[in-house]
Image (cartoon, grey):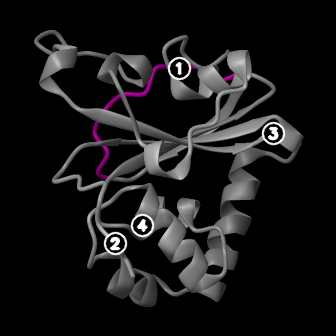
């Protein structure tokens, strides 16, 4: 397996080549974040754009890549201030959506792909934090053939799961 930093640099180069940050944000900034937006942008640019969204999307998200029920690497938006629990080389958290796939083969349909999770599922709670004070979502891009899950995790901010991108 390639080193995650090398993979990230390669992915960044290809992303900029295929879709400039200016063009990407001119389209993505018009919409609230949710899985529908990622699918729309992927169709628009004819490319996987999840990694690109971390770099230049307007909503702070975190990506966690798991292979064979082990977290391999993660990346978060520069403005994503929450501290990810160190899970590299360990299974995803028991209460994560990724674990539902690895343990039970569960893949949510598109209309249910954003599943609410506790902040403490993936992130550390600070002294005064309580899970009920936050609304986080996990959307898993699952590739059963390769036994991989890319978890897209974000905090709710005017989330409207019913909008139509036409």
Q: Secondary structure at mark 4?
A: helix
Which residue position is annotated with label 2?
164
Which residue position is annotated with label 3?
144
First of labels 2, 1 by sequence position: 1
Q: Relative to residue 53, is residue 148 depicted above or below?
A: above
Q: Residues within 10 Å of mark 1 (few under 14, many from 20)?
A: few
Mark 2 against mark 4, which lies toward the viewer? Answer: 2
Residue 86: mark in rendering: 1
Q: Marks 4/1: CA distance? A: 28 Å
Q: Secondary structure at mark 1?
A: loop
Which residue position is annotated with label 4?
37
Measured from the top left, where is residue 8 in percent x and y?
Answer: 66, 57
Residue at 66% over, 75% down: 47
Bounds of the magenta segment: 79-89
Q: Marks 3/2: CA distance? A: 28 Å
Q: Secondary structure at mark 2?
A: loop
């Amino acid at each position: 397996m390639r080193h995650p930093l090398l993979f990230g640099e390669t992915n960044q180069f290809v992303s900029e080549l295929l879709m400039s940050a200016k063009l990407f944000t001119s389209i993505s900034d018009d919409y609230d974040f949710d899985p529908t937006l990622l699918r729309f942008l992927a169709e628009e640019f004819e490319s996987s754009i999840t990694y690109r969204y971390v770099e230049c999307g307007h909503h702070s998200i975190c990506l966690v890549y798991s292979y064979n029920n082990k977290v391999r690497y993660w990346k978060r938006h520069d403005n994503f201030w929450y501290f990810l629990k160190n899970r590299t080389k360990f299974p995803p958290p028991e209460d994560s959506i990724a674990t539902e796939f690895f343990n039970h083969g569960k893949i949510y349909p598109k209309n249910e792909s954003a599943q609410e999770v506790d902040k403490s599922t993936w992130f550390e709670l600070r002294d005064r934090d309580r899970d009920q004070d936050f609304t986080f979502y996990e959307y898993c891009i699952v590739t059963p053939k390769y036994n991989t899950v890319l978890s897209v995790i974000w905090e709710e901010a005017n989330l409207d799961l019913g909008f139509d991108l036409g």
